[in-house]
Amino acid sequence: GFDIYGQCQHGARYLDFRVVHDVVRGQSQYYTAHGMAGASFEEMLNQVRRFLDEHPTEVLICDFNHFHRFECAAHHLKFLDIMERCLGYHMAPLALRRASSGGKGTVTYRELLTAGRRAVCLYGGWDF
């Protein structure tokens, strides 16, 4: 199998991230799980950023869901901080989607490219 960067290189544009929170030596850790534990989440998001940095006309949909062991709001807030730190300048903000040409919360590919925001992030069924 391919890592996230390799999957994007081979045409994937929708990424299904299932997220696990764990505490290791008193520190929150986040990693992916799809049946088995996977890579660290920060490593995967850095691969997404690398792909977007190298491909300025591509848009990725990142669907973050199945939040395992997220036991309090602080776990979500720390995870969101990692997302913003890794993908920040690529993330399509909710305001862009609300101010889209249709005005109904949709945004066109062209609007994403023009704004330079090409990572559409979905968070547990809610737009981020």
Image (cartoon, rainbow, N blue to C red):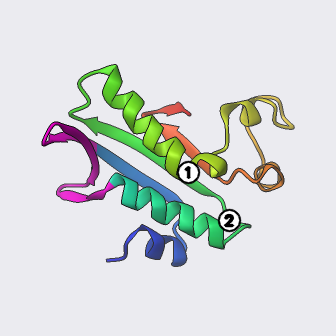
Using the numbered discs, state the Cα–Cα distance from disc 1 to disc 2 in whole angstroms. 14 Å
| Amino acid, disc 1 | Leu
Quarter in which the N terminus is drawn: bottom left
Front-most of 122 and 90? 90
Q: Residue at x 67, y 32 (%)?
A: 94
Discs 1/2, front: 1
Residue range corresponding to the magenta coloring: 20-40
Whether residue 30 appears in magenta in the rendering, the answer is yes
Q: Residue at x 46, y 37 (%)?
A: 81
From the viewer's perspective, is residue 104 above or below residue 40?
above
| Amino acid, disc 2 | Glu
> Residue lying farthest right?
101
Q: Residue at x 53, y 42 (%)?
A: 84
From the viewer's perspective, is residue 36 above or below residue 128?
below
Quarter in which the C terminus is drawn: top right
Mark 1 touches mark 2? (CB < 8 Å): no
Q: Which residue is mark 1?
A: 87
Residue 68 percent location from the top left of the image: 23, 37
Front-most of 86 and 128? 86
Residue 96 percent location from the top left of the image: 75, 36
What is the quadrant of residue 71 in the picture? top left
> Residue lying farthest left?
25
